[in-house]
Amino acid sequence: MPRYSARVLHASFLRWLERDHPELVAQLHDANHPRPYTLSNLQGELTPQGERMRIAAGATVWFRLTAMEEFFLQCVFDAIEKQQTGPQPDDRRLVPGPVYHSIDQHPWADLSSFAQIAQTVARESSNQPLRQHVTLRFHSPTCFVENKQALPLPEPRHVFGYLLNKWQLASPFALPVEEVQHFVESIHVSHAKIET
């Protein structure tokens, strides 16, 4: 498996989803259509070997799908129900396991609506001031594009700008853009540890 397996997973995911939702996949292939999801690299019991990752027999590996549109998520759940399995890489030696969607099932799994996220933030910010420090951890290579240039460093304006754009595109609750931009401009990196 390639070390950075998200592209392989992405292709496998679209082929899997296309079995039940070909119109949706055709839309997702359109370069002008915003992608309503992200896919991580394979995670779990992997051993690096040069540019590839070795998966030992019996090892458990997984990936995370993050969906930002309810219609898209319903199509994914529909495909899981019809096919009785989730997507998997195109390697028949890998046996698909269960699909988790609760933090009780897997620490990286959870379902939250935009309304739930907004309510949680409102509740927490009314009880106490927002935290001054936030730790972000990127578990896979993260790159942003600006003026057709790939920027591999997670600068606050790129990270939070990307999140703001995704929120504004998918959420029924629009955020005040100027206030968020002012907030983002006030964020500074105090510590970074970058490893490859």
Image (spheres, grey):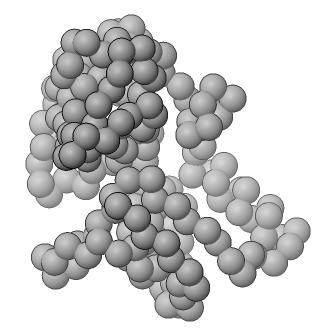
- Residue at left 38%, top 69%? 162
Q: Is residue 104 above or below residue 67?
A: above
Q: Residue at x 40, y 65 (%)?
A: 195
Please say whether residue 26 is visible from this viewpoint: yes
Residue 176, placed above or below residue 93? below
Quarter occupied by residue 142: bottom left
In the image, farthest residue toward the right: 127
Question: Residue 34: where, in percent of width, then height?
Answer: 25, 55
Please tell me which residue lies in front, 153 or 84.
153
Q: Position of residue 99 (x, y in %)?
A: 48, 21
Residue 74, given in percent of the width and then of the height, sits at: 42, 29
Residue at (43%, 21%) from the top-left corner? 59
The image quadrant of residue 118 is bottom right
Picture layout, residue 118 above or below residue 160: above
x and y, in percent, of residue 185 in the image: 50, 90
The front one of 145 and 25 is 145
Q: Quadrant of the C terminus?
A: bottom left
In the figure, residue 76 lies in which quadrant? top left
Can you see residue 161? no
| Number of disc labels | 0
Point out the image quarter for the N terminus.
Answer: top left
Front-lying residue, 178 or 124: 124
Where 115 falls versus 192 (above or below)? Answer: above
Residue drawn at the location 71% of the way across and 56% of the way down: 119
Q: Does residue 139 appear left or right of residue 189 in this picture?
A: left
> Viewer-proximal residue, 145 or 78?
145
